[in-house]
Image: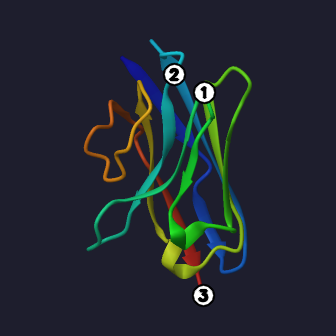
Amino acid sequence: QVQLVESGGGLVQAGGSLRLSCAASGRIFSINTMGWYRQAPGKQRELVADITSGGSGRIRYADSVKGRFTISRDNAKTTVYLQMNSLKPEDTAAYYCAYYPTWTLDDKGENVASWGQGTQVTVSS
């Protein structure tokens, strides 16, 4: 079992920046995918970005955040960061860290092995 602890959410004005962190502990597979989903009230959960360790180190972004958000991970590959710049009110949501013990095509969160507790991001206009 992998435990995920998130930090970094908060309230920011439109155009501002926030950085989310997600620290993983436990039985972490050498090839894994970690990333972020978000869910706003009344909306479906969506993949924001994820990054796969090993091999090509694939990175995926939602179209809505490309060019504004950057996902990265530390050398130990146990902490993932989401740098969010040029934030918009429509980025307001609860953000959840996710862990898969493998490479994945899932973009709906249906096969996530571990979830973080969630952190709120609120962007005011």
Viewer-nearest residue: 113 or 92:
113
Which three-letter amino acid code belongs to the residue tagged 2? Ile
Which residue lies at the image location 53% right of the left edge and 40% below the top edge?
6
Q: Alpha carbon of mark 2 to alpha carbon of mark 1: how far?
A: 8 Å
Label 3 secondary element: loop
Which residue position holds label 2?
A: 31
Give the number of the mark in front: 2 or 1: 1
Q: Alpha carbon of mark 2 to alpha carbon of mark 3: how far?
A: 40 Å
Sequence-first tag of 3 and 1:
1
- Percent across and percent down for residue 99 are 43, 33
Residue 103 placement, left or right of 52: left
Q: Alpha carbon of mark 3 to alpha carbon of mark 1: how far?
A: 41 Å
- Percent across and percent down for residue 100 are 40, 31
Which residue position holds label 1?
A: 55
Q: What quarter of the picture does the C terminus occupy?
A: bottom right
Sequence-first tag of 2 and 1:
2
Which residue lies at the image location 65% right of the left edge and 71% below the top edge?
12
Relative vertical location of residue 105 with respect to residue 29 in this rendering, above or below: below
Which three-letter amino acid code belongs to the residue tagged 3? Ser
Sequence-first tag of 2 and 3:
2
Which three-letter amino acid code belongs to the residue tagged 1? Gly
Relative vertical location of residue 48 with respect to residue 44 in this rendering, above or below: above
Q: Are marks 2 and 1 in contact (CB under 8 Å)?
A: yes
Relative vertical location of residue 13 with respect to residue 44 in this rendering, above or below: below
Label 2 secondary element: loop
- Disc 2 crowd rating (10 Å Cα; few below 14, some 14-19, many 20+) is some
Which residue position holds label 3?
A: 125
Label 1 secondary element: loop
- Percent across and percent down for residue 78 are 60, 24
Residue 58 placement, left or right of 4: right
Viewer-nearest residue: 42 or 71:
71
- Disc 3 crowd rating (10 Å Cα; few below 14, some 14-19, many 20+) is few
